Amino acid sequence: MSAPSSKPSVTEREARQVAEAAREQDWRKPSFAKELFLGRFRLDLIHPHPLPAAEDSERGEEFLAKLRVFCETRIDAARIEREARIPDEVIAGLKELGALGMKIDTKYGGLGLTQVYYNKALALAGSACPAVGVLLSAHQSIGVPQPLKLFGTDEQKAEFLPRCARTDISAFLLTEPDVGSDPARLATSAVRDGDAYVLDGVKLWTTNGVIADLLVVMARVPKSAEGKGGITAFVVETDSPGITVENRNAFMGLRGIENGVTRFHQVRVPAANRIGPEGAGLKIALTTLNTGRLSLPASCVAAGKWCLKIAREWSAAREQWGRPIAEHEAVGAKISFIAATTFALEAVLDLSSQMADEDRNDIRIEGALAKLFASEMGWLMADELVQIRGGRGFETAESLAARGERAVPAEQVLRDLRINRIFEGSTEIMHLLIAREAVDAHLKVAGDLIDPDKSLQDKAKAGAGAGVFYAKWLPKLVAGSGQLPGTYGEFRHGVDLSRHLRYVERNARKLARSTFYAMSRWQGRMETKQGFLGRIVDIGAELFAMSAACVRAELLRTQGDHGREAYQLADAFCEQSRIRVEELFGRLWTNTDAIDHKVVKGVMGGAYEWLEQGIVDPSGDGPWIADTTPGPSKADNLHRRVD
């Protein structure tokens, strides 16, 4: 069997249709964030803060204690950074510890940790060495275990999960050299041949792919009499004939990760290894990411805690103009930002994770917001730490140690965190993904009105339905509990957090009104207003984080666990967040989007090429995108097994 030789050619509309078909279409469970975007502040969905069961906490804490000892005694982060590789003995030690099976059910040999404790473990491992955290996360959050847990057959779980829990490393292969966030152009093919599929194609940025034993591969199955075809997911053994790891990629950060380019040439995969039906691959990928994305906020929380520790210790030791630099307002503001934001990120992460564990709520928006907000704020916190450290922040830990100072890898943390704004959906893609979910209710009642392919009869019917919906919905956006001074009084203990929750309630309604006004104004062109949609999502992220911070502070107060300090941190975060929210609301309607568009047209049309004169381009030669024509590999196989 031979693979199709040409890449799929799709229009913008076709690409949107593929993405839309992969979405979860229904909302069977309540969603705090979805309600927030609709102007409804459902505090009851997150307060009182949900808590893990006692046995889950006991099991989780027991493993964290073992993992901490391992991180402190077995992981040499400086060596991993220097050699750009996690030593095999470290990976073997993680296997012995059971860290590969943290999220896998105990009946398959895993530890059966909850999402909450899985994320705590990732944060702990990632604080010791971010590359180790990525290894564990890529294996369990998006690799073989999670898709099989959600969509695998009993036979597939019995065959593969015990291996993933103890011995086998897995990876997730979707991206291709010419395919990123637009999977409609996916070129890797899987052609049915009897009781197997034959895979051909090239996958890029395969985290863990260089050392993986098992792969989840997304490939396009042609439509046939036996099946409807479409993008489909497969479990693939990496020792199968025809698989070649052609390159081990190197990056500005996370230098220890085993990330490569993998070529498939006439690779036979048993049909029994197909996950779900043909055409379900994208839905499987997106559903897996609903909770899989929470691993990135875990790494950002870990980074925030470390940044706070270093900022505190350094700012007390370093003196300028007769006093510690922490006492200077310019530096103190940065420390306050790091402390308050770390508190809020942990609140968002723990709340979202506990909701995922309880499975009472639909957290597809919460998980996406957590990833978006944490990756942006984590980068800012690391950048502020480098600024606080001054020249030492720009100097490598190795250089600092060589001249007799503490080896603080501030610049490395900045480099390591940068990828989080791109991993598992870039910030720009996350804005669009979340915006689509946020306006879902509007599109369901008024979508046909702005669809150019719908008939006048369909538009008339949609108009009538929209009229009924908005007649009930819009009046509720005028006034609410956020305007009543005594509302949320249980959040007033020394520090008054109730006023921040009232602010969230009022601005949730304002956010919904702004979205409605924009849809009325732009209608079918709404999807092209990416700047506007991004700001809408960022406002929602801030409101969600404020809510989570207040709820977490109240939880800690009731538990007698640093409640007073938690209230102070939540108050500081909310004050900082409110300033950002006000700026974002202002930029909804006062911005440079139109002039930016004109400048971009000029740049792409060559009108400003004269501005590029006077430099030398150090870039090397070669195509912008590597050739991915199917065929046998001409490179040595760089795959290696870690026993």
Image: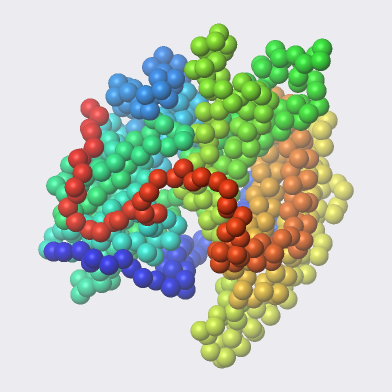
Residue drawn at the location 19% of the way across and 40% of the way down: 636
| Quarter of the figure with residue 142 | top left
Extreme-bottom residue of the structure: 457
User: Picture quarter containing residue 437?
Assistant: bottom right
Q: Specify the quadrant of the image occupied by residue 33.
A: bottom right
- Check the image and name the residue furthest to the top: 404
Seen in the picture, residue 394 relative to 441 is either above or below; the reply is: above
Is 257 on the left or on the right of 596, as rendered? left
Colouring style:
rainbow
Q: Report the quarter where the N terminus lies.
A: bottom left
Would you say residue 610 is visible in this rendering? yes
Q: Residue at x 35, y 39 (%)?
A: 249
Image coordinates of residue 55 in percent, x first then y, are: 47, 30
Q: Is residue 30 above or below residue 523?
A: above
Q: How many marks?
A: 0
Q: Return the x and y of residue 355 as percentages of the image width and height.
A: 54, 45
Q: Quadrant of the C terminus?
A: top left
Q: Residue at x 25, y 42 (%)?
A: 245
The image position of residue 368, as x and y in percent, is 54, 50
The residue located at (23%, 66%) in the rendering is: 4
Query: Considering only vertical position in the picture, is 274 above or below 639?
Result: below
Q: Position of residue 534 (x, y in %)?
A: 63, 57
Position of 97 with respect to 298 (left or right) is: left
Q: Is residue 62 above or below residue 148?
A: above
- Residue 284 appears in view: no
Seen from the viewer's position, the closer of residues 351 and 531 is 531
379 or 437, which is in the foreground?
Answer: 379
- Residue furthest to the right in view is 485
